[in-house]
Image: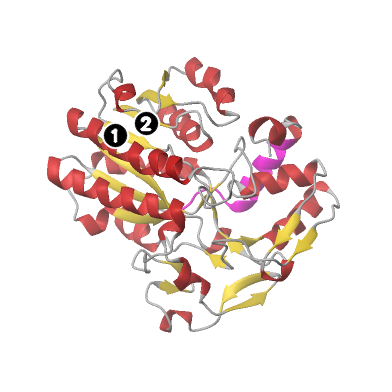
Amino acid sequence: MKILVTGVCGFVGSVLARELAQRGHELAGLDNFIRPGSESNRDSLKKIGVRLFHADLRAASDLEALPACDWVIDAAANPSVLAGVDGRTSSRQLVEHNLGGTVNLLEFCKAHRAGVILLSTSRVYSIAALSQLAVEVKNAAFRPVAGIEQLEAGIGANGVAENFPTTAPVSLYGSTKLASEALALEYGESFGFPVFINRCGVLAGAGQFGRPDQGIFAYWINSWLHRRPLKYLGFGGQGHQVRDCLHPRDLVGVMEQQFAAPRLAATDRVANFSGGTASAMSLRQLSEWCAARLGPHSVASDGASRPFDLPWLVLDHAKAGRLWNWRPQTPITAILDEIATHAAAHPRWLEWSAPL
């Protein structure tokens, strides 16, 4: 299979490219190299035979020189929920990257009759609906109160399902991904190429470019190991907010199924992929893991709220299990160990890959 990976030198794109190349697929990838740390993946990908192209999805002409392929995996995006509203980044550029880039990529797929797998996000789900969920603290972590599934469609003890509301607000970032999903499905229907939307929970692993607003597990572990300042933000400043955790390599098996899948109904082409409740962890619990693994470190507290922050967001991947017999393979302890090992080997990783 000939596969093109966008954002190939980012964390997710590089992991997927390496795994797919090892499975015998012919890989090409594009990247605009604007993210600090992207250059670190260039040489290693070239050594395993991945053809690299310096291209920006925002520029339609950049895609004209790309080779034809059977499938595109779209792993290129500005992944920060604060993008465009943090006073440091441009809202226009966010839309150009995440939505305009998707349009150009879909035109490429249309021209080459290539299928596309769009990596989407848990952040397409309604912030208003999620922030209104009743939660309680158990073992230093928020969790929904018992019977929460009776209060809101699409949510239960196993997390947020695909039929949970996606009504605004979902953040500018979330809205660009939600609009990209809709466009991808429409292009596929109109021009006859296969489309899958894989909504992912928090992706994490060694080599991720950790920042507080993205790559939180990598950011926290690297900061803890090298005794950089850390702070619990919002919700009383206790660190009880919870996310799930998934290693991107756990997506490769289902992608190979999707490459060979027969034509499916539109509703079956959108599914959550996450570590689920088994991998869900609060910042406080992550700190406890860090203390046991890396030694003591102090964490400051600031209860002031931040835009778009949520107390609990865990994706239910039961639909992916029904459709693809999929389940996450890498336990969260293995992911955290992998990050810690990488952090020890690269003591200046945060400074190099994601300067603040």
* Residue type indicated by callout 2: Leu
Pick the residue in front: 117 or 91.
91
Mark number for residue 104?
A: 1
Viewer-closest of 227 and 306: 306
316 lies above or below 230 = below
Residue at disc 2, secondary structure: loop
Q: Residue at x 60, y 52 (%)?
A: 332
Q: Is residue 182 left or right of residue 292?
A: left
Question: Is residue 192 on the magenta stretch?
Answer: no
The secondary structure that most of the magenta stretch takes on is: helix
Question: Magenta region: which residues?
Answer: 327-343
Determine which quarter of the picture holds residue 69.
top left
Residue 26 horizontal side relative to residue 68, left or right? right
Q: CA distance from mark 1 to mark 2?
A: 7 Å
Q: Quadrant of the N terminus?
A: top left
Query: CB under 8 Å between callouts 1 and 2?
Result: yes
Give x and y (percent) for residue 53. Answer: 40, 19
Q: Which residue is mark 2?
A: 57
